[in-house]
Amino acid sequence: MNPSTYGQTHEIINQAPPLERYNAMTADAVLVAALDREGASWHLDALIRDGLALTQPEVLALADLANRHTPEHHPFSARGERIDAIEFHPAWHALLSMLREQGLHALPFESVAPKPGAMAARAAGYFLHAQLESGSLCPLTMTFASIPVLQQEPALYARLQAQLLSRKHDPRDIPLDAGKQSMMVGMGMTEKQGGSDVRSNRTRAVALGAEGRGAEYRLIGHKWFFSAPQCDAHLVLARTGESADEKGPISCFYVPRFAPDGSKNAVQVQQLKDKLGNRSNVSSEVEFLDAYGVMIGEEGRGVPTIIEMANFTRLDCVIGSAALMRAALIQAIHHARHRSAFGARLIDQPLMRNVLADLALESEAATVLFMRLAGAFEHSSAPEERAWRRIVTPAAKFWVCKRALEFTGEAMEVWGGNGYVETGPMARFYREAPVNSIWEGSGNVMCLDVLRAIEREPEAARALLDSWHAVAHRHPALDEALKTLLSMLQGEASSREASARRIAQQLVLTAQGVLLAQHAPAEISAAFMETRLGDARSATNRVYGTLPARFDFAAIIERAFAG
């Protein structure tokens, strides 16, 4: 018997190699086609370069490093000064630099007359980066969403424009007028007693002199979830007047990290949240101790003002969840192509093919949906486009973010035990999945928003449903689904509210069915409509991998991620 090499009792075989050095853009035929459809092919070359860069081993390692070495809060300097510094691993700053270099914080706003398709171009780039790492996206999303709000304040925006639009990431914690190259903007809406019910907020703002839009205030109160406290400024809600009750009007305020005199603004970080996922990013609890702020928007119109910001962040929630689906899907397909069990490769086993094909359908439907929504954000003056933006976006945020939870769990199961450990990406994808359902309004909030939007925008709703009918009448399952949706919308108001989740689900599935009928191969759209909307729905809508056997699973998988 020959002595074994120390530490090596066996040859390592039947393990999938890391998925790396592929092009995340060119490997996604659905995304490439949607980019062209939304008029953004001018950005394809940049996305192809980025798609390859994002899959290099050293870049993939950044995501792991940023999540293992989580941010640290340093409330005091060595001299005892209150500084509330947040220390990040260098991997975090590398990720932020990549995001800014691609213009994902401001691409559609970089020019007075942006190129057609700029929103879709930005959405596609965001989707690629979200497959790498989720936490670094949060401050970029908020910065992006703040720009159209700040643009409504010409004097303030003129001072901030260069740093908002800059493609350089500057991590220094210094005042903006001290030579900082770029800035990030966060948001603070929720308080302990209210959560999503921001109209119960009790933080108050007292004028330092003149009152109203553009005037200076001091803020006293708290925020229970204050996203990314290291940002250079935050948009927050507070009630004007001295009273701490819930009667004063709620307004929106621009609260910088540094006061005009260069001192650290009196926004005191109480602690960082210990979160399930999104661990590379910071969420915090803060107290406003006479913090300096400037009112933006009209007094008493704080909620509508900041909701404009939330509309953009909700779109990013949809994109981010679709990206988690895509990332988990291609990892599962890659694993199945390299792993054998019970005498055959997983990819060649009929039941595994069923699971992967079903996941591929879900992922494609999410991708075509978010790209269509991105286009609508650019053309929302037309009634139908306004309906996609105002009505379908919250429904998509509800549905796609919900589906991502089950989706990532199923994809993890394809990996088996290897998927459940933190040395691979699947566990991180799974931990990331719940946040987009919760952030910027949970499921119930989104579904009720769908109903409110339909009631407030009846012309837009009619235009949307009419356009869907023009497609649906050629597809029996889709036509029946649209009729069911119309029936739901015609019920009593109390019944509609109780059924809001069913309505939102039916609306977004119908939307996905319409888009696939228009833009996907016939086999893809048929499989989706039959199993999500048609005769096979009752047997397939609860568990992935229950598609009827007659569909060509291998072709669906190959379309999703060519081998």
Image (cartoon, rainbow, N blue to C red):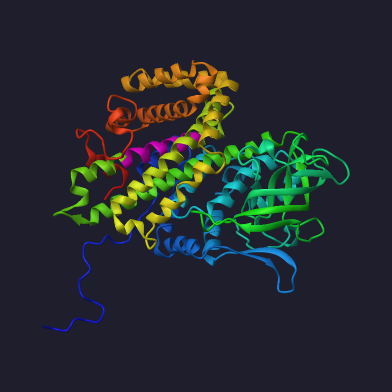
Percent of width and height locating residue 451:
54, 25
Q: Is residue 328 left or right of residue 444?
A: left
Relative height, residue 196 to residue 18 (above, below): above
Q: Is residue 298 visible?
A: no
Q: What residue is drawn where x is 74% and y is 40%?
A: 153
Q: Residues in magenta? A: 359-373
Percent of width and height locating residue 85:
66, 64
Q: Main secondary structure of the magenta part?
A: helix
Q: In the rendered image, which quarter is residue 3 located in? A: bottom left
Q: Is residue 366 magenta?
A: yes
Give the position of the N terminus as an image quadrant. bottom left
Q: What residue is drawn where x is 38% and y is 22%?
A: 481
Relative height, residue 253 to residue 268 (above, below): above
Q: Is residue 556 visible?
A: yes
Q: Residue furthest right?
A: 209
Percent of width and height locating residue 15:
25, 62
Q: Is residue 40 magenta?
A: no
Percent of width and height locating residue 101:
55, 55
Q: Is residue 374 left or right of residue 190?
A: left
Q: What residue is drawn where x is 13% and y is 83%?
A: 2
Residue in front for this viewpoint, 133 or 522: 133
Q: Is residue 532 left or right of residue 486?
A: left
Relative height, residue 282 to residue 471 (above, below): below
